Image (spheres, rainbow, N blue to C red):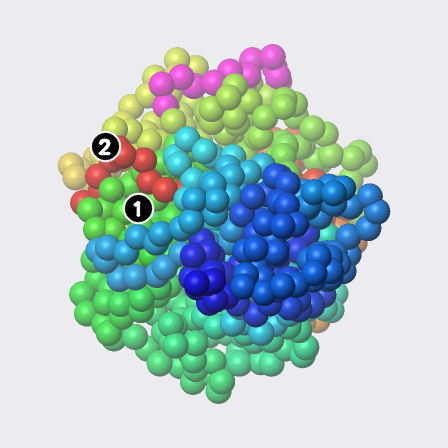
């Protein structure tokens, strides 16, 4: 008895498959081209196509097609001719044929490879999925498609028409050894914050324009076509942190204007006008949808849900300390769990039940996290984190909490589709960071006499410069020798530059000099975790210092009083405190503290302490005793309620602050000036422009002896982050356990 079309469909590896530039849905008989155009073929034409696909590359005789597709009838050869003609029209197949080749007096051959877009079942953890049985020709076709998919230049995407209910796209999991990935974008500039649609068919991301510092949401396929702009921002407006709704019909995102005015928005995936949900509770934060698609979830210290229609906030009920900084929550695919990041610079992943309850720590990394995503089956989490001094992509298995290195380096912000074994991320091709020196004009001078001078040039990245108080020496971090090391030199003898061996410094903040310029304080990695060290020069003797009882030291500075240190402590939950210690006691005895510090340093000329806060714009000062800290400058523009520092959050504003004989200064920016010297508190007019091109400062230091500014700068025009894609990597058989 001949099989019905439904019987045939039941044997297919997937309901959808790709042939060349087209995706075919076998259940609806629709063709979708790379430009989004759609068409439909007849049942018999579909059966002919499936017969050709089952024997791709081989000649299928006309008689075989007649007998298998029109059994127990007496059709003429014309029915095959008409079916093939319909397929060629759907493929826009020209002459010479690119899709279906006619073999004279014999039959037809399908030319392109067939890629079956296999849906990955999403089941609760621990569920054993029943095996599917395929006919042998289709199993061969599926195996061939699995081998060829990574080699395709992005040929697996489907141009969506916005219905959101199409069958899902999936790829077979890659082994740990298969670590190659495809770059979906390659334009100059930055593409960030990628998010895959639930079926894995589309990716939305933010494309930055350096000319006006704006960012638009773009929809992209992996075919060789240009992306489509989903939003059209005004100059200075950024649309970022996009997240697909579970049904694929909508995209939520964050809109900011000049890094300040922040709104949560939603827009149809098919395009149209964006709708405001609510003002951001604070600054821009990553958002995700709950499994029902009616609320957004975000973290801003505590975790909250937001009604996607009216913006009503609903705090999640779970156990947490008041000072815990919980960020970037995401529901598991089955809706049972919420995983989130706790902490900022020394972070880990934690988990709570979706209904609330106790928080469970999943990792013991205590490092910078750069995004994470659930796998579609809910059995693992893929995360990007700082390992040593390189970003590493890892897979955390649940349960068991085994963390496996996936062998993919220098990528960030991974995102997996809800129902598809595919992964996108930012391929982190950042601009080089170079060390420059510029003379700061004094008196009546308004502009530097000479352009900035590059210092200690190399092919590596230079970061966090620090100048001794007497102007004799410089220290900075650089990977010029391959790994990141601490380097130092006598400023009058550039040829004296050399590394400090035997220490692996952390890159968060600059090393700090003693008053005599003969010692450095550096936070470095050890077998026991991060620890504060003192380095004596020129011998480069390294002395580990005691670990403060309150938490981990992330930065320190010498105070004028002998044996006193100012240390910024991370309590392990994201909150930071600047503490003045008596280092003669064992353990160190805290003398005073400044809660919520983001950055703290000593202004030796004025005998003052300078602070920024992690989550608030502005600069504070106090005496050396840390009593009565008072605000100095709110760091807002005079003519608008916008920060003078071009960054989305105030966390890194302290990297731009330097002490100089007249007080403190910050390196701000404005229209036409990428780096401007601004005294604090601000005078009637801002200071000179140091850099006319837009860029990013990682840190700066001032040489009071010569009046020179040293800073590390990355030009925005040289940023080239791209969006990468790969099949979702499976875990290797061995790994390390983080209970």
State the residue position of label 2: 528
Q: Secondary structure at mark 1?
A: strand
Q: Is residue 690 above or below residue 86?
A: above
Q: Is residue 532 above or below residue 384?
A: above
State the residue position of label 1: 396
Q: Residues within 10 Å of mark 2 (few under 14, many from 20)?
A: few
* Nearer the observer, 317 or 654: 317
* Nearer the observer, 225 or 566: 225
For image coordinates 31% across by 57% down, the residue present is: 378
For image coordinates 70% across by 71% down, the residue present is: 639
Q: Which tag is nearer the camera, tag 2 or tag 1?
A: 1
Q: Earlier in the sequence, mark 2 or mark 1?
A: 1
Q: Position of residue 210 (x, y in %)?
A: 72, 52
Q: Position of residue 393 (x, y in %)?
A: 42, 41
184 to the left or right of 317: right
Q: Is residue 546 above or below residue 595?
A: above
Residue at mark 2 to residue at mark 1: CA–CA distance: 22 Å
Q: Position of residue 444 (x, y in %)?
A: 79, 47
């Amino acid at each position: 008895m001949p099989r019905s079309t439904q019987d045939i469909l039941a044997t297919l590896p997937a309901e959808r498959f790709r042939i060349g530039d087209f995706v075919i849905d076998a259940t609806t008989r629709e063709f979708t081209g790379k430009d989004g155009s759609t068409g439909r073929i007849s049942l018999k034409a579909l059966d002919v196509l499936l017969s050709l696909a089952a024997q791709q590359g081989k000649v299928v005789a006309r008689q075989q097609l007649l007998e298998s597709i029109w059994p127990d009838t007496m059709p003429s050869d014309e029915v095959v001719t008409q079916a093939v003609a319909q397929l060629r029209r759907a493929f826009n197949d020209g002459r010479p044929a690119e899709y279906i080749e006619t073999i004279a007096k014999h039959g037809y051959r399908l030319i392109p490879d067939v890629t079956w877009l296999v849906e990955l079942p999403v089941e609760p953890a621990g569920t054993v999925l029943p095996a599917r049985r395929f006919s042998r020709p289709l199993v061969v076709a599926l195996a061939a498609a699995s081998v060829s998919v990574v080699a395709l230049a992005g040929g697996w995407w489907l141009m969506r028409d916005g219905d959101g209910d199409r069958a899902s796209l999936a790829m077979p999991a890659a082994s740990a050894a298969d670590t190659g990935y495809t770059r979906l974008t390659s334009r100059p500039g930055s593409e960030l914050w990628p998010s895959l649609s639930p079926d894995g068919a589309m990716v939305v991301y933010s494309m930055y324009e350096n000319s006006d510092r704006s960012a638009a949401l773009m929809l992209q396929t992996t075919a060789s076509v240009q992306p489509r702009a989903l939003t059209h921002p005004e100059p200075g407006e950024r649309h970022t942190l996009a997240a697909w709704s579970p049904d694929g019909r909508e995209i939520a995102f964050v809109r900011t204007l000049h890094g300040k005015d922040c709104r949560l928005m939603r827009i149809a995936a098919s395009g149209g006008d964006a709708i405001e949900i609510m003002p951001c509770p604070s600054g821009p934060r990553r958002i995700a949808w709950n499994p029902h698609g009616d609320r957004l979830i975000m973290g801003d210290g505590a975790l909250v849900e937001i009604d996607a229609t009216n913006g009503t906030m609903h705090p999640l009920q779970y156990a947490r300390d008041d000072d815990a900084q919980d960020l970037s929550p995401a529901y598991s695919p089955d809706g049972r769990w919420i995983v989130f990041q706790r902490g900022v610079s020394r972070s880990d992943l934690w988990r709570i039940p979706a209904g609330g309850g106790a928080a469970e720590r999943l990792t013991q990394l205590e490092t910078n996290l750069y995004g994470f995503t659930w796998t579609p089956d809910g059995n693992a989490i893929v995360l990007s984190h700082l390992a040593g001094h390189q970003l590493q992509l890892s897979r955390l298995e649940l349960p068991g909490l085994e963390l496996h290195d996936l062998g993919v380096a220098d990528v960030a912000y991974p995102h997996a589709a809800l129902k598809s074994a595919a992964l996108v991320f930012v391929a982190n091709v950042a601009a080089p960071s170079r060390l420059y020196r510029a003379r700061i004009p004094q008196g009546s001078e308004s502009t530097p006499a000479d352009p900035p001078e590059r210092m200690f040039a190399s092919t590596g990245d230079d970061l966090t410069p620090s100048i001794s108080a007497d102007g004799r020496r410089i220290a900075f971090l650089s990977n010029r020798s391959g790994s990141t090391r601490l380097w130092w030199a006598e400023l009058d003898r550039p040829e004296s530059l050399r590394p400090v061996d035997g220490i692996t410094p952390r890159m968060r903040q600059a090393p700090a000099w003693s008053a005599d310029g003969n010692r450095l304080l550096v936070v470095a990695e050890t077998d026991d975790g991060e620890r504060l060290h003192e380095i004596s020069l020129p011998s480069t003797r390294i002395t580990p210092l005691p670990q403060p009882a309150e938490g981990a030291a992330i930065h320190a500075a010498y105070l004028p009083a002998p044996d006193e240190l100012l240390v910024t402590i991370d309590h392990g939950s994201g909150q930071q405190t600047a503490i003045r210690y008596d280092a003669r006691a064992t353990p160190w005895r805290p003398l005073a503290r400044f809660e919520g510090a983001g950055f703290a340093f000593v202004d030796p000329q004025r005998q003052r302490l300078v602070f920024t806060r992690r989550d608030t714009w502005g600069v504070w000062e106090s005496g050396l005793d840390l009593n009565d800290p008072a605000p100095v400058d709110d760091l807002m523009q005079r003519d608008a309620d916008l920060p003078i520092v071009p960054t989305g959050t105030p966390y890194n504003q302290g990297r731009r602050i330097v002490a100089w004989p007249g007080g403190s200064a910050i390196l701000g920016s404005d229209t036409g000036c990428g780096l401007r010297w601004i005294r604090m508190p601000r005078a009637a007019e801002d200071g000179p422009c140091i850099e006319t091109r837009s860029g990013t400062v990682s840190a700066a230091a001032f040489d009071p002896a010569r009046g020179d500014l040293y800073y590390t700068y990355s030009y925005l025009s040289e940023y080239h982050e791209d969006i990468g894609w790969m099949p979702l990597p499976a875990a290797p058989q061995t790994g390390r356990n983080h209970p």
